[in-house]
Amino acid sequence: MPKLKEFCCTAWNWLDERLGIAPLVEHAKHKTVPQHKHSFWYYWGGLCLFFFIVQVLTGLMLMVYYRPGPDAYDSVRRITTEVQFGWLVRSMHSWSANLMVFAVMVHMFSVFFMKAYRRPREFGWWTGLGLLGAVMVFGFSGYLLPMDDLAFFATRVGLSVPEIMPGAKPIITAIARGGGDVGPNTVQRFFLLHVMLLPMIFSALLGIHLWLVQKHGNAVPQSEADKPEEARRSVPFFPNFMLRDVAVWLLMLNLLAMLAAFFPWKLGVPADPLAAAPAGIHPEWYFMSQFVVLKILGNWLPGVLGEYAGVGLFTAGMVLWGLIPLFDPETAGGKRGRQVTYFGLFVLVAQIVLTVLAYRLA
Ligand code: HEM
């Protein structure tokens, strides 16, 4: 045992001399995480990170066999039916993508209700919204890649929505779709977006986001902030909180493995642009609220007015959501704080109700 200890010390000194890692460990040892009745929500940012790591690892494995372009469908069929454990890796990638969107949403609403967007954490909120946007585009671009009938028709509908905006059609035709209809060119472009552009943008945003969390530490809800200093509790990040984080990650890995094994991700029939769209075509669950609003407004208003109103409504909503830190900037309670909480509750309930409604109408 003393020999092992001596070896570890020598190895540590060797690494520290070359990489200067001792200050990082010192920093981690001094970092603390507040403990209170809402501490459960602090695990969700780490969970988003966990699912992102799963996405990168399983995505790299899928890329070994996936072929963008005209062979896309055949390569996914091969991954699902011929490559050893290909079906499992593909299932894990798809389930983890959905769980990641869910975790990001829970994380966003929890930091919202804890008012963690307030001074000096505004950039944490804004980089977070950038990450949410990137996650949604990851989902949208990944959905097309297998090129089965569902993927094809959902993307066709998805791209037709922004196309109605003035001046957008030539840009979408030339850049996003690479032609008049969704086809192998679109798959090639979406693949580039999915495996190159988005990971670069996402990693840069994530780096800033995590650096800001290190810089400002975790925000505490107002009820905790009002307590006297000596009544507040916290635990060291390293090793206490980190070990709990790891325990939660392992639980999620189990859930993911069970979902992937018992509910393997399906592959539909190959896309046929000349066939009629299958009945009940709809996007992934996280686009369903937008989908149903467009559908309802489209039925109510004549011509493209419905689409204009829907796109306008969502753009205004997103801008308002992004500006929240400017409307409710202060740490003290008050009328504005309460108004913002009611607004957040309204957005959350509206999202849930619209999503349920969308599935009932689909
Ligand atoms: C994949 C996306 C994301 C990842 C990997 C991520 C990661 C993290 C992590 C690890 C933390 C620290 C632990 C915690 O407080 O939960 C954190 C904090 C934070 N995140 Fe995110 N996040 C993501 C998306 C978002 C989104 C969508 C928002 C909001 C729009 C957001 C806003 C914040 C804020 C304001 C904090 C500071 C919370 C505090 O001080 O307690 N994040 N994030």
Image (cartoon, rainbow, N blue to C red):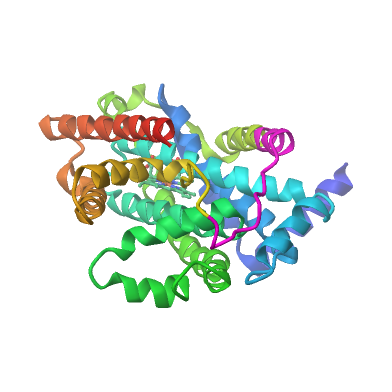
Q: Quadrant of residue 337?
A: top left
* Number of numbered callouts drawn: 0
> In the rendering, at what x and y percent does residue 351 appear?
34, 35
Whether residue 265 appears in magenta in the rendering, the answer is yes
> Would you place residue 236 above or below residue 209 in this image?
above
* Residue toward you, 296 or 329: 296
Q: Position of residue 331 (x, y in %)?
A: 21, 37
**Residue at the spot 48% in from the left edge and 39% down from the top edge:** 102
Q: Is residue 66 above or below residue 337?
A: below
Residue 361 at x, y = what percent? 39, 33
> Residue 59: where, in percent of width, then height?
65, 58
Question: Looking at the image, is 145 positioned above or below residue 217?
Answer: below
Residue 58 in sight from this viewpoint: yes
**Residue furthest front in the image:** 275
Tell me which image quadrant ligand 1 sits in: top left
Q: Which residues are magenta?
A: 253-275
Residue 29 in view, yes or no: no
Q: Which image quadrant is residue 12 in?
A: bottom right
Asked whether 217 or 12 is in front, the reply is 217
Say whether residue 68 is left or right of residue 31.
right
- In the foreground, 122 or 305: 305
The reply to whether the magenta stretch includes residue 14 is no
Quadrant that contains the C terminus? top left
Residue positioned 86% across, 44% down in the render:
2
Image position of 361 (left or right of 84):
left
Query: Could you tell me which quadrant the N terminus lies in?
Result: top right
